[in-house]
Structure formats: structure tokens, C-alpha cells
Amino acid sequence: MKHPVRLERQNGVALIAIENPPVNALSTAVRRGILGALGAALSDDAIKAIVIAANGKTFPAGADISEFGQPFAEPDLPELCDLIEGADKPVIAALHGTVLGGGLELAMAAHYRIAHEDTKLGLPEIKLGLLPGAGGTQRAPRLVGVDVALDMMLTGAPITAAHAQRAGLVDGLAGDDLRDVVKALAAETTDIRRTRDLRRHLTDGAAYMARITQRRAALGKDVAPHKIVDCVEAALLLPFDAGRQVERTAFAECLATPRSAGLRHSFFAERRAAKFAELAHGHVRPIEGIGILGGGALGVRMAINCLDAGLPVTLVEQGEAGVGLVLDRIGAHYQQAVSAGRMSEGQGAAALTHLNLTTDFGSLRSADIIIEALPEQAGLRQAAFDGLGKTAKPRAVLATTSAYADLSELQRVSTRASEVVALHSFPALPGLDALEIGAPSGVDPAAVTTAHAFAKMLGKLPIRSAAHPGLVGAYLMEAARRAADRLLLDGATPDRIDAAMRSFGMALGPYQAMDLMGLRQGWMHRKSHPHEPDPRYLALADRMCEAGWFGREAGRGYYVYAEGETHSVPNSDMLQLLAEERRSKGITTRSFTDRQMRDQIILTWVNEGARLVGNGIATRPSDVDALLVHGFGYPRGRGGPMQDADQTTTFQILRRVEILHEADPTGWDIAPLLRELAAERQNFGDLNG
């Protein structure tokens, strides 16, 4: 195995080169390598200065967070930073790429920092519920002052190299000759400037404390932001070593919080979800033009996503009136984006120049990916794929946006079995960025990897599902609907259930999400796949669809959406249908607490997630979590329902589900995998690999 750190000596300068792809994370092996190289350079009388740099695409982009919570391994990063700062020869950090977290803390411990002009620098630990733990809370205020330090740590957002130079975080900028510039500086530098000794930003104690007080007053309830402010306050009030001890204690306290555990779980879940098995076998085909068939809400949303990514789009809609309506919708989106300041008029106009709206089905023949986004209508999708099979160019990926489509049937009618996938998106809300990719049997791995690359181009998290009508997202939404419907039948209301889930931290309640996504697809699927007889089945959604209340796009679903109003109100006609359903079943209603409603829905997701993993439809439990976080707005700080379940034990979860099953046998079909894990005393995390 190649050693991740190499020491080179030339003309009195020692170069410590880190090479631990892909992001040069500061793992135990890397830290030990730097320590050994540093010791060798310091003990060599011929060496007058030391450069720390990295090969590959970036200077270390952070610590190796997989080691967090593991047994201590020497040297830890705080110790290594202290040794670098304490060196009796000048140490210069050559920065490029994305210098984040522990990588930036390592750089701040050096005596000088020179950055490539394209470098991004940041302290994003807050995104994991943590704080810089290697002296960063003490060194950053000394280098850049209280405001810039707190901005970087409380937002986690990176800054540009130019901003970093203005703030004093880096001493100079360079172009592609970065390594040569730094070596030249090292050859002529004799001064040692330790960050811990800097005082220029700590001289006005009253002003410093006033900023601390202001920032503290604006904080919410999360632990990490308060600890960050406490540590930055300690940078002023305490000697450096005492401040470092405050930081170390605060880091340990943050690491032990459920929020940090949930955020770290989410971090790894996202990375596992994006690692499709097909990536090892399939290549990515060119993606230069996108075809979209259908100009409804899903088609328009997909077109906007593609245009925002700079991809040319050809959208086919029936009739000139339909084309005009699509143009109005997309134009209104960009007009609103310009008015809100999210883009300039030039950017909005440029995006629209990549849009071709037409009624000509044959215009799709040049597209590399063709996305069917037609309304649910018997035979319509099959006819479309029959036409696409005859029209699309060879090796074009043919995708459906329907979560309930029978992909094997679309493979058959298109005669393009190797090219058919599903691309299922979720409610269009800020921060929700999952794109579920359904991969049927017989599909070419290259079609899946191309869909994966397409998701990345759109800025979305690709999550793989085995092809099965419903995919993972639709199964989870349908499970939530069934669980919530049981609560409705017994006395709850959609707005109360939605409010309970939002108070838990969800972006949307289940009925809001269903309205936003549209009720038609689920209804059509239920009609073609009748449910088993169930005396407690609530036909409310079916009756709503029969009345044409398909959700937000129709202006009416569980809520009424009046044009021009920012808030929806419960649909009183829907509540009347609900009352009729209760009367027909002889239900005596009762009240529920928010926790009772919330727990029933979350336990449903855990049980259904176990079923999907057990059936092979979901790859792993953490994929279920990632999909619910990025598709439905489950609180990222909790990690997802499977991670929440692992905070107890599967045995306890099973017992809770069994109690619900005993009270309502037809409503709770316990997943075999949940029983297996409980019997073997395993958790869902054991299956994530």
C-alpha cells in the first residue's frame, strides 16, 4: 500500500506532500505520516524551512470523520497542529482546492499560508453538529477577528481565496505556480510567526465582547452554535492553552449529542446512497441534450432543473395551447427568480434560450436522455414508450417520472430493455434534492451510470432502487398515508397530523406532501392493484380523486389553494367526506397527542423501510434514511427513521409495532427483517456496510 505522506528535500526546503485520495482526509495514517516527516525535517540541520502541501485535487478537505467516536489514535489532530505551530523552523502551507475543517485547522497552525487563487476555505463542522476541535476556535479569531471567525464557524459556508486574503486568513495568492511560489518563499523566510501569539484582533476587548453578546442572543437551541460562541469568547478571555481545553471539552460535548450523531449518519448515508454498484461496470454516456415528454407539473419542474444546470431541453406537449401554457409556467418561474434576486435578467434569459418547446414528437430523436412525464392515463405511458422505442437515437436513456410505472412493461413495449430507467423526484421545496433512480432487470449499467451522472448535474442526490412498481419513495409515502389515514379515521384531521410532523422537524406533513406531489398517481395505482379487504380502509383519498381533487396543481386536495394566497386552508368538503366515512364505519372518534401521531407515522416508516430492504427494493437502511431526509424533509439532524430506531434497539421497536398490530391487525403487517434483526440483537446500522 502506498504511503499517504512523502517527504522531499531540495535546496534546504523540506516538502511534506500528502497523497490520500480522493480528498486527502486527515486519517490516522496521514497524521502519523505528517508527524514522521515533520520530525525528520526538524532534525535535519540542512533543512531551513518546511512546506506542507498536497497532491491531487485538494489540500486536506477535513478530518476523517469515520474515526470520530473511535478509540483514540496518536497523534490526534490537535496535537499535530500544536507540533506544527511549535516548530522551530518556518512552516508554510500551500493551499489549493477545498481546504475545509481539519485541513484548514492544520493550515492555521502553520506559520504562513499561500493559497491558489481558486481555493475555497471553510470550517463546516457545524453541519455535523460539531465545532473546529483542533484549535480552530482559538486560532481563527486571532487571524481574522471575531466576526469573520464566527461567520465561518456558525454558517459553515466556505469563503474564496480573495476573501481569505483580505481577512488575513492567508498571506498571499498564487496561480498554477503555487508550489514554486511557496518553495521560493520558504527558501528566503527565516521568521517564525505562531498564530497563537497573534494579538491584533484581541486588543479591543469591549468591542469583541459586544459582538459575542450579539451573536449569542441570535442563537437557537442547538448545542453546537452556543459552544462555538463560548470557545471564541474563550479566545479573548483565556490564555491559548486554556482556550484549547475549553474547545476540547466543547467538542466532546457536541460529539455526544443526538443531533451530531444524526448529522454524521446523514453525511455517510448520502455518500453510501450515491455509490451505485453499476459505477464499477458502466461508463457515462454523453449528456448534451434532454428531451421531456409532457408539460405538466413534473415535466415543467424537470425542464427547469435541466435549464438551471445549463442543459438544452426539448419539451414536447400536445397542441399549441399546451405549448403556450408550458412557456407561461417556465417563463413565470424565471421572472419570479429574477424579481427575487436569485438570478439576473441575463441569466434568466440565457436559460430560456436553451428551451425548445414543440408539439413534434420526432424532435426528441436527438436527445441523450428522454424523460416521460405524462399524466396518469390508461395506456398513455405504454404508447409513449412504444413511440420512443422507434424514435429515440441508439443508446439514448429512456426514463419515466412515474413512481408506479411497470418498468418491465415499458422495456417490452419500447424494445429498449437495456435503456429504460425511472427518475422519480419529490416535492419541489428548497433543500429537498433526492432523485430516485429505478434500475430494472436487464438494464445496461451504462444507462444507470448515465442517470446517476444526470442527477449529479442537476445538483441532486441519486438514490438507487430496484425496479418495482412504487419504488422506495412511493412505498414510503403510501405507508405514511395508510398510517395517517388510520389516525384520521379515529379522530385526527390532516392539518393536525401535518402540524405534528412539522413540529417534529419535517419540511412537510404527509398530507401537504401528497397534495404537492399530486394524488392521481397513487389513486391510479390503487385502482389497478386493489387492496385486500380491510374494514378499516379509509377511502378518503379515492373519493377525493373521483371528485377531481388531485392536490395543489388542481387547486384542491386535502387543502384548498386559492390563487394569489400564500397559505392553504383545510378543504372543508374533504372534512365532510371524512365525517361520512367515520359514520359509515361506526367510528367513535378520540383525540391524539402530537407525539402519538408522530410516533405512529415514524414507526410505519421504520417497518416499511425494513420490508423494502428485506425485499431488496432498497439497497440498505441508510438509503431509506437518505431518501426521507432529501426527498420528504425528515430532519437531517435526526438522520432518518432507521437511524432514529437504532437509538433504541430493534427489539424495542418490534415490541412497539407488535402492540400497534395487536390493536389494529389489518393496519400493521410486521416486516420479517425487523423480526430477524430483533431476534439476532442487531440494529439497522449493521446492514449499511
Image (tube, rainbow, N blue to C red):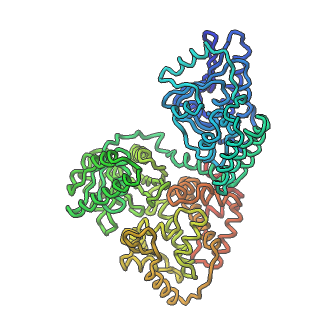
Identify the residue shown where x is 63% and y is 47%. Answer: 128
Q: Position of residue 631 (x, y in %)?
A: 50, 58
Position of residue 80 relative to residue 352, above or below, is above
372 relative to 83 in the view: left or right: left
397 relative to 317 in the view: left or right: right
Viewer-proximal residue, 88 or 45? 88
Q: Position of residue 683 (x, y in %)?
A: 67, 56
Q: Position of residue 507 (x, y in %)?
A: 53, 62
156 relative to 241 in the view: left or right: left
Position of residue 473 relative to residue 58, above or below, is below
Identify the residue shown where x is 71% and y is 63%. Answer: 651
- Indicate the quadrant where residue 558 lies: bottom left
Q: Position of residue 390 (x, y in %)?
A: 24, 52
Q: Is residue 58 visible in this depiction of the protein?
A: yes
Q: Is residue 528 visible in this depiction of the protein?
A: no
Viewer-proximal residue, 438 or 21? 21
Position of residue 255 relative to residue 194, above or below, is below
Q: Quadrant of the N terminus?
A: top right
- Indicate the quadrant where residue 186 lies: top right
